[in-house]
Amino acid sequence: MRGQAAKIVGHAWPILVAQLAAMGMMVTDTVLLGHHGTVDLAAVAVGGGIYIAIVFALVGVLQAVAPTVAQHVGAKRDGEVAGALQQTVWLALALSVPGILILWFPDPILALSTIEPAVEEKLRAYLRILACGMPAALLYRTFYSFCNALRQPRPLMVISLGNTLLHGALAWTLVAGVFTEPLGALGCGLSNVLVNWVGCALAALWVARSPALARYAPFAHWQAPRWPAQRELLRLGLPMGFSNFVEITSFTLIALFVAQLGATAVAGHRVVANIGAICYMLPLALAIATLAQVGQAVGARDRPRSRAAIGAGLLLAGGLSALLGVALWLAAQPLVAAFSGDPAVRAVALSLIGYVALYQFFDAVQTVAAYALRGYKVTFAPMLVHTVAFWGVGLLGGWWLAFKAPQPMGVEGFWLSTLASLVVAAVLICGILWRELRVHTADSAAR
């Protein structure tokens, strides 16, 4: 297990850096627009939430390339690796069509809330600009998942860091109007699109020219779309995409419900949600690395190796996230102060951060267990668990605790229900994983 732990850590840290770099782009937009104008900041805050929900749902479908490629590599079916990538590229292009249409015609989504006319005008223009980068965003994530399945995360880490630096320079130039009139939110949108296409081109170039991937000839003998391959990708990917959608929308809808409690509650909730999102990058990186190890072991029919990879991934994620939770609790006051100077907002955030500290362990365990199951190509059952846990226990339970309980808890009700939802998800998904391990053990014994 020690060897598997070392491999997972070596694979996970570049993924973690890349993910934090991607979050840095969102932070850059917030800081620049915070000094530019409230209307532009509001447009990007709402538009960014819509864009992220759509992209991550579609990216979840494309992540089916990871277990597919990992199992091919483990089974030494190197000749099938390129075909899996090429079929996923076709799928990414196909999925970009509904993604573009949703961003171009967002009326059904915007009808869910009342938005000031000035904000809505800029919001619609911002989303239409982002629509132009949808194919690049999905293709980049396809290459990202492909490289991670082959345990080649470092080049994509370098590209992510470069993208963040490029975005910072471009966005500042366009938002502030260094060479033209200030573009505000539209400048952030244009910068995001340009960076997406640059990142996509660089990732494609590396996949095509990298000596590390040369034996797979990723772009050689290009295949036309094949329905059996597409059907298998959709069978694996649609549940993963829906799981992503459930998780993202649960937090988005919580923010909408919390809006009823006033600006201070919303601001405090947002501070803690941002801290939670940053913390989640650690178990997510470990989970992606665990998926690659498990998928390759399953492809090789190496049961002891797959069990060792799962054990190492769970111990690493659970242990490190528990320590992270303790650190959050001890550093709560200076951490919250770094996010807000408003005493009232700080008070709300400090009342909530304990829940984030407590749920780190459970969030890490359920994340790694779900990704380990993806390594076995088991995606439907975890999707059901996520739907029940995040929408049922987390969202509906939080709404009841916040507003309808005999003693309404306000915003704390949502965070208590979030903690409960992650405990439920961890228990149920670990149960599914345990069952899958027993099935594979029985199959190995039968052979």
Image: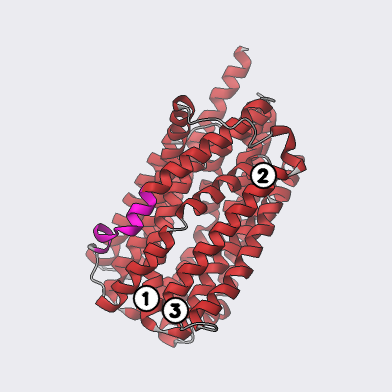
154 falls in the magenta region: no
Q: How is the image coloured?
A: secondary structure
Q: Amino acid at mark 1?
A: Ala
Q: Can see residue 375?
A: no
Which element is circle 3 on? loop
Q: Can see residue 203?
A: yes
Tell me the number on the disc at residue 207: 2
Tell me the number on the disc at residue 183: 3
Q: Nearer the viewer, residue 38 or 227?
A: 227
Mark closer to the chain start, 3 or 1: 1
Tell me the number on the disc at residue 42: 1
Please state if 296 lies on the left or on the right of 332 as rendered: right
Q: Quadrant of the C terminus?
A: top right
Q: CA distance from mark 1 to mark 2?
A: 38 Å
Q: Look at 55% across and 37% down and name the residue there.
A: 65
Instruction: Provide residue 145's location: percent of width, then percent of height.
Output: 58, 45
Q: Look at 34% across and 70% down and name the residue there.
A: 123
Q: Nearer the viewer, residue 120 or 373?
A: 120
Q: Amino acid at mark 3?
A: Leu
